[in-house]
Amino acid sequence: MITWSRNTPFEATDTLQETWTYHEDGHQKSIPVEIFLGKPIDIVSLKKENIEDFASKIDSISQSRKNLYQDTSLEHVMVCPVCSSSTDTATKIIKIYGAQYCRCNYCTHHFVLDRLSQKAIEEFYTSNQTYQSTYADPETLQKRLKDISLPKARWTIERFEHLVGQKPKKILDVGTGSGHFVHACRTLGIEADGLEISQSGVKFCKDIFGIKLIQKDFITEWESLGDYDIITFWGVIEHVPGPVIMLKTAAQLLDKKPSMIVTEVPRWACFGTEVQKLFPTSIIRHLDPLGHIQMFTDSSLATTFLKGGFEPNAAWYFGMDYYELLVQTAHHLGDKNILETMKSYINPIQNALDHSRSVDTIVLAGTSTQAE
Ligand SMILES: [Zn+2]
C-alpha cells in the first residue's frame, strides 16, 4: 500500500509548515510542504445567474450524464489511474447519474470505474458551449479575475520565487478555458501562454483579452511548444484518463531546468462530498461524473506528483462546501431566498471548513525531481 502521513502543528493558522512522508513497501520519503488555508470569495454574486436556474440546470445535467453513462460503449478501467494496481479490489462507493465512483485500496485514489471513451470526452470539451459559458460570461468577468484568477496567479508566482529563488520567465497554462489565468499572469507582468482545445474558449479569449491561445494537444504535441519554467493545470487532470501522463509530459517539457508545476483538483474527503452523497439526484458540480472522472485525496494527488516526476512543495486548501449545502437546501426546500438570506455567513463558515481542511479543492505546487 501507498500511504502518506503529515507532521502538522495543532493550531491551524492561515499558513504553516508541514512535513509530508510517503510510505510504500518499507521505503519512505519526507518532503517539507508549505500549507495555505482559505480563500474568501463572493460566490453568490459570481454564481447569481446560476442560482435562479439551478433546477433547470439539474434537469439538463442529470439527463445528459444519465444518457452518456447508459451508453454500452463505456470503458471499464482495469487499473488505478494513479498507482496502476488492479481495479478488481477497488471498493465501490456511490453511483451518480449511473456512473460508479470507486476507491483504490492501494493508493486511496477515487475515480469513475466505467467511463466514457476518450473520444466522447474530447468531443464534449471541443464542442460543448454550455460548459464554457459558466466561465466565459462577460458580466462576471471582472469579479472572476479579482476573486479567482489574480489570487491564483499571485500565489503561483510567489511559490516559484520562494522555491526557485527567482521570478518565473514564462508560464504555460494547460487547459486554460477562456484564458482568465493567462490574462491574470500578464497583468502581473509575467509572460504566459494558454493551451486550449475548445473553440469557444479560444474565441472568448481572443475577443475579450486579445490573447491568442495555442490550440494544441498537450500530450501529443508538447515537443512543438515553447520554453516555460512553470506549467499550470487549473481543474484539468481530474478530467483526463491519465493524470500521471499529464505530469510526466510536463516533466519532459520542463526538462531539467529550475521549474514548477501547479495543479488544482477536486478533493474526495470533504464536507461538500458528504453533502452531495445526501443529495445525489441534484448534483451539478464536484461529484459530476462527466468532468470529474478522477477525484483525488491528498495522498493520491501527492502520489501522482511523485509518479509524474515532481515532489509536492506547497498546498492550498479552499472550497465551496458550505455554498453547496445552501444550494442543495434551497433546492430541496423550494426556497430561493435561502442563499440571499445566508450569504453573509458563507465566508466565515467556509473559512472554518478551510482551516479544518474539509474542503472540496486543493491546489498543489511542486518542483521537478529531475532538476539539476
Ligand atoms: Zn491506486
Image (cartoon, helix red, strand yellow):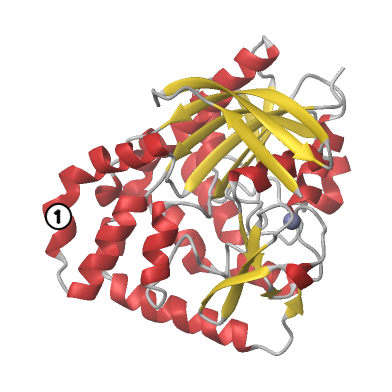
The quadrant where residue 69 appears: bottom right
Where does residue 217 sit, x and y in percent of width and height? 77, 53
Q: Is residue 172 left or right of residue 242?
A: left
Relative to residue 71, is residue 247 drawn left or right? right
Q: Residue at x 71, y 90 (%)?
A: 72
Do we see residue 77 in this rendering?
no
Badge 1 amino acid: Glu
Q: In the rendering, at what x and y percent does residue 257 appear? A: 83, 21
Q: Name the quadrant containing residue 312.
A: top right
Q: Is mark 1 within 8 Å of ligand 1?
A: no
Residue 171 image point, x, y percent: 66, 30
Q: Is residue 104 left or right of residue 61?
A: right
Which SS class for mark 1?
A: helix
Near mark 1 (Cα within 10 A), the count class, few <14, some 14-19 or many ≥20, is: few
Whether residue 120 appears in this view of the structure is yes
Pick the residue in front: 279 or 166: 279
Residue pictured at 73% horizontal, 35% vertical: 22
* Nearer to us in this view, 287 or 109: 109
- Rendered residue at 53%/84% (across/down): 66
Q: Report x, y in % for residue 353.
A: 35, 42
Ligand 1 lies in quarter: bottom right
**Among all residues in the image, which is located at the extreme top?**
165
Image quarter of the C terminus: top right
Figure check: 92 above or below 104: below
Between residue 237 and residue 7, name the one nearer to us: 7
Q: Which residue is mark 1?
A: 340
Q: Is residue 151 above or below residue 179?
A: above
Image position of 66 with respect to 294: above or below: below
Count of number-bearing discs: 1
The residue lying at 76 percent from left, 57 percent from top is 242
